[in-house]
Image: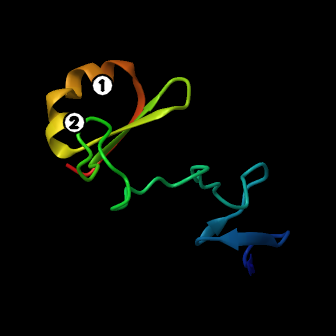
């Protein structure tokens, strides 16, 4: 941290402007607890094909669907889903 010249009292400088009291020293970043990635071992719950969509329900359970079934049931799934992770 540099000290700003020209003031009677030296003030710290950050990003080219004087640091103000009460200003946080860093910006917090939100990181999800888990990062969900669909792999080739994730299979559709309807037909057994490779999953392209993961639907997380309110109870914490998830459903996996291939591209065909995720498009077919899209509106119904989004109505009950807490989170939808899709690669299609």
Q: Is residue 9 left or right of residue 31?
A: right
Of callouts 2 and 1, which one flags the residue occurring earlier in the amino acid sequence?
2
Query: How far from the left and from the top, in percent, is residue 75?
Result: 22, 22
The residue nearer to you, when weighing 17 against 63, is: 63
Image point (27%, 46%), residue name: 48
Which residue of the protein is positioned furthest toward the front in this rendering?
48
Mark 1, other Cα within 10 Å: few <14 / some 14–19 / many ≥20: some
Image point (85%, 69%), residue name: 9
**Image height of 41 relative to 75, above or below:** below
Q: Quadrant of the N terminus?
A: bottom right
Residue at label 1? 77
- SS at mark 1? helix
Dividing the picture into quadrants, the one containing residue 3 is bottom right
Mark 2, other Cα within 10 Å: few <14 / some 14–19 / many ≥20: many
The residue nearer to you, when weighing 12 against 9, is: 12
Image point (72%, 52%), residue name: 23
User: Distance from label 2 to label 1 (Cα)?
Assistant: 8 Å
**Image height of 64 relative to 13, above or below:** above
- SS at mark 2? helix
Dividing the picture into quadrants, the one containing residue 73 is top left
**Image height of 33 relative to 60, above or below:** below
Query: How far from the left and from the top, in percent, is residue 59?
Result: 55, 24
Image point (29%, 49%), residue name: 51
User: Which numbered disc covers residue 33?
Assistant: none
Which residue of the protein is positioned furthest toward the right in this rendering?
9
User: Which numbered disc covers residue 70?
Assistant: 2
Query: How far from the left and from the top, in percent, is residue 72?
Result: 14, 29
């Amino acid at each position: 941290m540099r000290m700003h010249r020209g003031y009677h009292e030296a003030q710290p400088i950050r990003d080219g402007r004087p640091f103000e009291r009460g200003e946080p020293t860093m910006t917090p970043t939100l990181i999800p607890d888990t990062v969900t990635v669909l792999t080739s071992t994730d299979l559709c719950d309807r037909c057994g094909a490779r999953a392209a969509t993961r639907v997380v329900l309110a109870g914490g359970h998830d459903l996996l669907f291939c591209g065909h079934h995720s498009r077919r049931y899209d509106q119904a799934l989004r109505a009950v889903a807490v989170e939808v992770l899709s690669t299609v």
